[in-house]
Image (cartoon, rainbow, N blue to C red):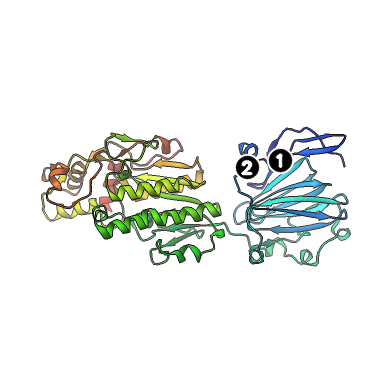
Amino acid sequence: MTIEFSKQLKATATPIPGVVLYDLPVHGDNRGWFKENWQREKMMALGLPDFSPVQNNISFNEKAGTTRGIHAEPWDKFISVATGKIFGAWVDLREGESFGAVFTAELDPSQAIFIPRGVGNAFQTLEDDTAYTYLVNDHWSADAQGQYTFLNLADETAAITWPIPLEQAELSDKDKAHPRLGEVVPMPPKKTLVLGADGQLGKALRAAYAGDVSVEFATRNDFDLTAAASYADRNWKNYSTIINAAAYTAVDTAEETEGRKAAWAINTTAVASLATVAARHGITLVHVSSDYVFDGTTQEHDETESFSPLGVYGQSKAAGDAIVATVPRHYIVRTSWVIGEGNNFVRTMASLAERGIAPGVVNDQIGRLSFTQDIAAGIKHLLATNPAYGVYNLSNDGQSQSWADIAADVYELTGHSRDAVTGVSTEEYFKGKQAAPRPLNSTLNLNKIKATGFTPAPAKQRLSEYLEN
């Protein structure tokens, strides 16, 4: 066997999405050779996913012509030759447009290949005493074999040209019995779990992902965030994403004894449990944050601002954000003044207008409304485009307003006089009432999420549409 020495580390895309062939630098002299078989930092710089391998396996093959496959496994693999030479064949057995796509290549120790979950692989040794090694990002178990997908090595549709004809090769009886492509059940994608599916944002996420069978919605009855069994009784290996749309949002009640306990239990302790699951299983965690993590002394908040919460609700949300930020794959979506299906400020003002009531509404708290359809669309955009992990502000766009301004807009849009709304200060409005402190400035800078290609609709446009519907 002749090995090409001193190649540059190089990544080459293949016809199968996610399958990448790598050239590896091999350094040799009269004593033999050395190579960096797996170098996380360098390979990630070339675009290799940070797939977090947990197991290293070696397959030794005594004779040329030994042929294994075609097996699609429920984990990612990074495969390279240790000694000898192989002919590799890969067939996409995942659900989707690329199902059935084929790629073949000969590999020696100067090459490696990354195979995503659900892509079938097969190897035929071209030399005696060939060994190849593969890193996988899940532990093998007998239970996992039930999640494999197989294709017959002689499938006519894939039409793989084996260097050593299959009738002359060494095959197992199991491999000979695998189905043809027309009989293969494609491997489904990993699932997305939406928590808080009965809330305002949860309902909007249901609409955004309507018809997508890979998205699973859980209400508080399906998944109790405060129960240890919720985290222990689920096979997390089958999930790629968790969207946490659940939260304790009773801002004023959170200042009371029982409310304080509930706020911390749901907004912090439960979030820590979700973060543990996500980090352990390589899951992307999407967590919805709030303008209440700030004290409102800054006129506009960007994603780099430090926490400065005023009340218990904001403190519990800030603690949750800090925990989520430690998860390798996370999106913290920070929003404000949420409006969706259910009880909310806009519905209350519309009801008051219809009943002829002239309300006093706070005029010194400034921000933008965030309609749940746009929050859901923004979350869907982040997961589809996969920008850098981190915090993204997400409210509706347009001019900042006070609550009194928005109330006046509601009155006007429902055919009533704007003058029916009287502006009052926060201090005056809550005088004599038990209330949590509020940030006076809640406007979120949207430049970061806009840079990803997502621009939320203007708040006034969404308000008009909301009231029409």
**Marks 2/1: CA distance?**
10 Å
Task: Provide the secondary structure element on which disc 2 rests.
Answer: loop
Report which residue position mark 2 lands on.
Answer: 48
**Nearest the eye: 266 or 8:** 266
Q: Where does residue 367 sit, x and y in percent of width and height?
A: 27, 40
Give, as a three-letter code, the residue at label 1: Tyr
Q: Where does residue 339 sit, x and y in percent of width and height?
A: 29, 50
**Nearest the eye: 24 or 384:** 24
- In the image, 447: left or right of 76? left
- In the image, 279: left or right of 335? right
Residue 454 picture quarter: top left
Lower sequence index among marks 2 and 1: 1
**Nearest the eye: 2 or 39:** 39
How crowded pointer 1 is (Cα within 10 Å; few <14, some 14-19, many 20+) is rated as many
Task: Provide the secondary structure element on which disc 1 rests.
Answer: strand
In the rendered structure, find residue 382 and report the number of the disc placed on it: none
Locate the N terminus and report the quarter of the image it occupies.
Answer: top right
Report which residue position mark 1 lands on.
Answer: 22
- In the image, 431: left or right of 171? left
Q: Where does residue 257 sit, x and y in percent of width and height?
A: 26, 58
Question: Which residue, as the protein is rendered here, is positioned at the far front?
Answer: 257
How crowded pointer 2 is (Cα within 10 Å; few <14, some 14-19, many 20+) is rated as some
Give, as a three-letter code, the residue at label 2: Leu
Residue 73 picture quarter: bottom right
- In the image, 416: left or right of 57? left
Q: Mark 2 and 1 residues: CB-CB less than 8 Å, in contact?
A: yes
- Determine the residue positioned at 32% across, 59% down: 262
Locate the C terminus and report the quarter of the image it occupies.
Answer: bottom left
